[in-house]
Image: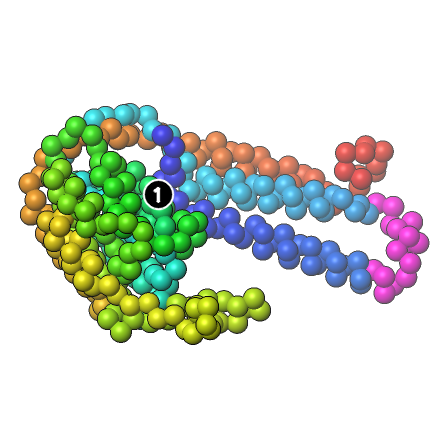
Amino acid sequence: MFRFGSPYYLFALALIPALVALFIYFRIQRKKAIRTFGNPEILEALMPSASKTRPVWKFIILQIALAFLIIGLARPQFGAKLQNIKRKGVEIIIALDVSNSMMAEDIQPNRLERAKRAISRLTDQLSNDKLGLIVFAGDAYTQIPITTDYTSAKLFLSSINTNSVPKQGTAIGSAIELAMGSFTPETKTSKAIIVITDGENHEDDAVEMAKKAQEENIVVHTIGMGLPQGGPIPVSSAYGQSDFRRDKDGQVIVTKLDEKSLQEIAAAGGGKYVRANNTEVGINNIYDEISQMEKSELQSRVYTDYNDQYFYFIIVALVLVIVEFLLMERKNKLFRNFKLFK
């Protein structure tokens, strides 16, 4: 198992493209400055010790050294000890609607972004429970298999958008069905599904699927994302201008929360319905309900000991810095005919 002990240092890698851009800019300005003094070919003959490529090689070596140094500071580690950890908890799978209607801004900044933030905060509260994430629109897909790796869950969560599912629609029933098959098999632990959507189901019989889940002792909760009055769906025009999604007659489409459907799904699944608003999403209220469920012993295999490998990267960085320091920008008279660096 590989991981970074201090992954936030990796953001410093963004410095390298910026430094490359600055280097190219100053090289161009230098060439322009030389041209102001005369013909570059004539000036080159007057400067036999000058090298065109040595400064470039020095810069490349220095950037590679910087990359190795940053990676070393991020503390790359390999798992060295795998243990079976037993804990008591429940299994939770969140089914998140990523259809276009979730971009409506009646809940700020929009329905989808607000739901993602709520899920992220919930993840921070978990310690013993297993969590999985399904995204759905016209189809349903597993985004995060059931896991106790909350860090990876938050990483995958941040990348979710309306393009995560190619087919548009709102197949709530398919999402519940996929979630039912995504729990750890042959475990007696309590299981719960949280469906986060605006409820505009156009694809299947979600109520019937929630009943099937309840028959398998899986509780289905629903969270309604959206306000009763609804809101238009923002889109960008071909010219980059902001507009709203329109129907075939050119009228702005207003997507509204289908609260009745979500209440029926929650009732059929033996769960609770909560309506989100601009103050809170309500996922904590659902989790409070789930926390009251009977907890069973969960077993997961995790790495409990890691070996740091950062020193290899630091050594390579130091060696490259020494090479860059020893490499002179001008040609050495003794090695002028050596063509590695012209």
The residue singled out by tag 1 in the image is: 141
- Which residue appears at 31% of the width and 51% of the height? 203
Badge 1: residue crowd in 10 Å (few <14, some 14–19, many ≥20)? some
- Which residue appears at 9% of the width and 35% of the height? 296
Q: Quadrant of residue 253?
A: bottom left
| Magenta segment boundaries in residue numbering | 34-49
- Which residue appears at 25% of the width and 41% of the height? 177
Q: Position of residue 153 (x, y in %)?
A: 31, 44
The local secondary structure at tag 1 comes to: strand
Q: Position of residue 241 (x, y in %)?
A: 52, 72
Q: Residue 84 or 115: which is nearer the viewer?
A: 115
Q: Position of residue 184 (x, y in %)?
A: 21, 32
108 left or right, relative to 69: left
Q: Quadrant of residue 3?
A: top left
Extreme residue toward the front, this view? 249
- Which residue appears at 26% of the width and 59% of the height? 199
Q: Residue 37 or 216: which is nearer the viewer?
A: 216
The answer to whether residue 187 is magenta is no
Q: Amino acid at mark 1?
A: Tyr
Give above or below for 335 relative to 207. Answer: above
Q: Residue 92 or 3: which is nearer the viewer?
A: 92
Q: Quadrant of residue 321?
A: top right
Residue 266 visible in the displayed image: yes
